[in-house]
């Protein structure tokens, strides 16, 4: 009988980083692809062996009614979900703030709560892709930076609370990454978009894979990945 592969869940799998992470994990895990864009998730699933999809949308108070049965064996949860908005405080509506916190924080919090029993049973890992925006200037990106600071606080609490349950939690802080979101950011900033000046999604995925493959007696709690500027 062929041994079942361990299960990994990638939240935000339709985005540039999420797709790269799912592809990097596919040789070692059966990957669950979670996110809002079901069409994009299914398209990615067709390229990965035994991948399965989970449409998750917790915007504006929505709740999760059902999880895929595969997640009962979950041993790795990677959160890559993220939404960006650019604008001054004066010009950023309450709806934008709510959308950012729903996408960047509340969805992650709820999914984490639901998968914790499986992760505890597996003594698994949680890897959270955050942003260097938590330590930079928040001007004209206050809502985004605030949501990511909230993610950092939640992740640190998760790290402290779940250590005794054998769960290792790692925060990854990438610099600017060459994604469609970055193109939109540069457009809003009024500057050129040169993908060679930024990290590739594959480079972020390689850093995450390095964490996944680290020895069982080690715990990498957090690190930054920055591009080599040209």
Image (tube, rainbow, N blue to C red):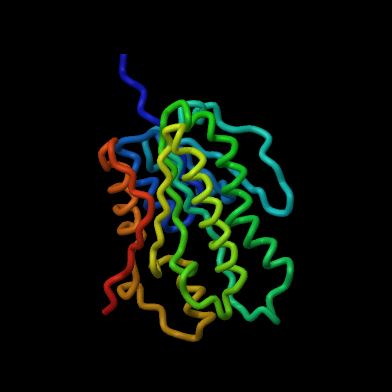
Picture coordinates of residue 106, whole percent (x, y): 63, 51
In the visual, does 36 lie left or right of 22?
right
Name the quadrant of the N terminus. Answer: top left
Instruction: Tell me: residue 220, above or below residue 119.
Output: below
Q: Residue at x 55, y 39 (%)?
A: 54
Instruction: Tell me: residue 94, above or below residue 212.
Output: below
Tag count in the figure?
Answer: 0
Q: From where the camera sits, is residue 8 visible?
A: no
Picture coordinates of residue 22, whole percent (x, y): 39, 46
Given residues 88 and 219, the one toward you in this image is 219
Picture coordinates of residue 219, whole percent (x, y): 33, 44
Given residues 217 and 141, the one toward you in this image is 217
- Residue at the farthest top position: 1
Q: Residue at x 73, y 50 (%)?
A: 61
Q: Residue at x 48, y 42 (%)?
A: 33
Given residues 154 and 38, the one toward you in this image is 154
Q: Residue at x 46, y 32 (%)?
A: 165
Q: From where the camera sits, is residue 142 visible?
A: yes
Instruction: Tell me: residue 158, above or below residue 81.
Output: above
Picture coordinates of residue 185, whole percent (x, y): 50, 75
Q: Looking at the rendering, which quadrant does residue 125 occupy? A: top left
Name the quadrant of the C terminus. Answer: bottom left
């Amino acid at each position: 009988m062929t041994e079942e592969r361990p299960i990994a869940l990638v939240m935000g799998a339709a985005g540039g980083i999420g797709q790269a992470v799912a592809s990097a994990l596919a040789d070692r895990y059966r990957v669950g692809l979670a996110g809002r864009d079901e069409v994009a998730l299914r398209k990615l699933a067709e390229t990965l062996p035994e991948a399965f999809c989970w449409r998750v949308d917790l915007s504006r108070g929505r709740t999760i009614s059902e999880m895929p049965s595969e997640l009962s064996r979950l041993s790795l949860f990677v959160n890559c979900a993220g939404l960006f908005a650019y604008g001054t405080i004066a010009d950023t509506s309450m709806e934008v703030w709510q959308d950012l916190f729903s996408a960047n924080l509340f969805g992650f919090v709820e999914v984490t709560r639901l998968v914790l029993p499986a992760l505890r049973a597996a003594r698994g890992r949680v890897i959270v892709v955050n942003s260097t925006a938590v330590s930079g200037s928040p001007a004209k990106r206050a809502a985004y930076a605030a949501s990511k600071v909230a993610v950092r606080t939640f992740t640190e609490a998760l790290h402290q609370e779940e250590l005794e349950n054998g769960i290792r939690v790692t925060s990854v802080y990438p610099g600017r990454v060459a994604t469609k979101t970055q193109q939109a950011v540069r457009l809003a900033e009024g500057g050129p978009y040169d993908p060679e000046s930024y990290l590739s999604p594959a480079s972020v995925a390689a850093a995450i894979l390095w964490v996944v493959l680290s020895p069982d007696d080690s715990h990498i709690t957090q690190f930054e990945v920055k591009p080599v500027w040209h």
